[in-house]
Image (tube, rainbow, N blue to C red):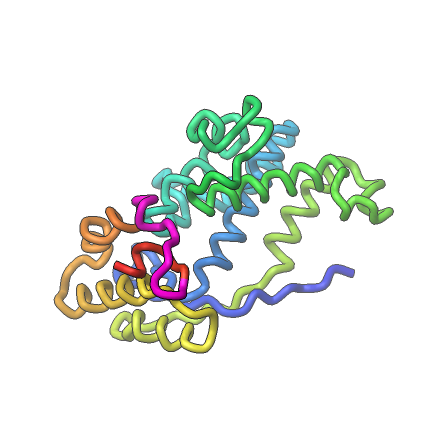
Amino acid sequence: MVQKKPLHTLWAQSPNPNQYLQIIDGQQRLITLHRSVAALAAAAQAWELDFIAADARRRLENTEIAHPKLTGAEADAEHIRYAVKAGDRKSLCARWPDRFARGGARFRRSIGGPDCLAAYVSLLEWTNAFIDGSSIAAFDPSVRKASITERADALLQAILEDFHLLAIFLAPEDDGPAIFEALNDRGAPLDAADLIRNDIVRRARINGEDAAAVIREYWQPFANDPFWRESELGGRVRQPRIDNL
């Protein structure tokens, strides 16, 4: 019997009704599920399981407007688009050749770069290992006896049906940034950069400005620059350079 796995809560708000939802808290959970489905779609395509790949991909993209259902932060947007459109290892190697070695056979995790890309490559490797039966999970007799098609389909159904998020929707007038800080106050400590970015969003909304445009123009040049993500000593504590700034 498959056990249902709760993944905690997801807080969302719609600044523009009927257009999109902004995730206030729970981004990592949602992006992990999204990339798990993207990795399965790419793996199924490689195994020529076209109907499973198509079923997975329709969960990733709004086909009516040819736009991903999840865009993520600006720093992650390009990696999400690649995961949705052409997330196989060959395409990733062609786009980010400095992250791969031996003709794409080995992924370089130690040279830095976006963590989201490393996470997606790991998900792709684990998915392929499950489908071809070489993973630890395949030692289970029921998994080992299953066909490649059955394993791929079982994995897709497990992701779609056996993980649950409790979605809480905020009203447009609710202060999303303040709620974000309150929710994370007792969890993992937030970086100074997280708090500053959150405050920029809050102030932009108060002033009636386009928060996404403000972040894109004034914040992303820092967030996307590897120089500011590097760690350095600030007194006795090593932290990202952007936090020290």
Left or right of 33, for residue 79:
left
Q: Residue furthest front?
A: 235
Where does residue 156 sit, x and y in percent of width and height?
Answer: 63, 47
The location of residue 220, given as percent across then percent down, is 26, 49
Residue at (53, 35) in percent of width and height: 108
Given residues 12 and 184, the one toward you in this image is: 184
Image location of residue 121, percent across then percent down: 55, 39
**Residue 99, position in %: x, y?**
48, 33
Q: In this rendering, does residue 227 appear at all?
A: yes
Query: In this view of the protein, can residue 55 be seen by the observer?
Result: no
Asked whether 181 falls inside the magenta stretch, the response is: no
Residue 47 vs 78, above or below: the answer is: above
Q: Quadrant of residue 208?
A: bottom left
Residue positioned most to the top: 103
- Total of numbered circles in the picture? 0
Residue depicted at 58% across the width and 31% down the height: 106
* Residue 233 located within the stretch drawn in magenta: yes
Give residue 49's quadrant in the image: top right
Q: Looking at the image, which residue is at 34% across and 62% down?
A: 234
Rendered position, 33 above or below 77: below
The residue located at (41%, 60%) in the rendering is 238
Quadrant the C terminus occupies: bottom left
**Foreground of the two, 140 or 47:** 140
Quadrant of the frame with the N terminus? bottom right
Q: Front-most of 160 and 39? A: 39
In this picture, is 127 found above or below 168? above
Q: Which residues are magenta?
A: 224-237
